Image (cartoon, helix red, strand yellow):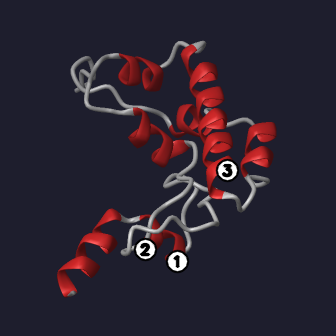
Amino acid sequence: MSVNNINSPSISIEEMVDVVDTETRVLFNKIPRNVNLGYLINQALIDRCLIKLDKTENTLNNLYRSGSRFSEKQLSRTCINIGYCADADNLVAADPINSNLLQGLTEEEFFIGASGTRKGYNKLL
């Protein structure tokens, strides 16, 4: 018995990994510790990846462009780059997180990038 995937398309890992090319990944790792400048560079690199994605015809692009609740931030955090994050005191750390959820995060990166960490910390105060 075959399963019909028309209503629930699946996205291959290759589609998600292919969003960031090697040259752009190298540039993400060179983002400066200057938050103001680094934030702009990080966003420009994410935009570069989204332009590349827009030129491809695949399920990930279709889902992103469909108007669903899959936002640019979710796409970026999942398969492009997390970037700068604020701590519990709402101060932005000088070091961006230069990986994504698909690549994997260290324990420190996970807790720095998780919004629940800031919410939980504020409830303790």
Secondary structure type for disc 3: helix
Residue type beneath disc 3: Gly
Q: Position of residue 105 (x, y in %)?
A: 54, 66
Residue sitting farthest toward the left = 123
* Residue occupying image coordinates x 62% and y 51%: 36
Residue 97's image quarter? bottom right
The local secondary structure at tag 1 comes to: helix
Residue 56 picture quarter: top right
Q: Are marks 1 and 2 in contact (CB under 8 Å)?
A: yes
Mark 3 surroundings: few (<14), some (14-19) or many (≥20) residues within 10 A: many
**Residue type for callout 2:** Phe
Q: Measure how far apart labels 1 and 2 are at the Cα level.
A: 5 Å
Residue placed under numbered mark 2 in the picture: 111
Query: Quarter of the image holding residue 25?
Result: top right
Secondary structure beneath label 2: helix
Query: Residue under circle 3?
Result: 38
Q: Is residue 108 above or below residue 9?
A: below
> Is the Cβ of the residue at disc 3 closer than 8 Å to that at disc 1?
no
Label 3, label 2: how far apart the Cα atoms are? 21 Å
Q: What is the distance, in whole Å, between disc 3 and disc 1 at their CAs?
A: 20 Å
Q: Which residue is mark 1?
A: 108
Residue drawn at x 44%, y 38% is 75
**What crowding class fits label 2: few (fewer than 14 Cα within 10 Å), some (14-19), or many (20 or more)?**
some
Nearer the N terminus, badge 3 or badge 2? 3
Q: Of residues 78 and 57, which is closer to you in this image?
A: 78
**Image depth: mark 3 or mark 1 in front:** 3
Disc 1 residue type (three-letter): Glu
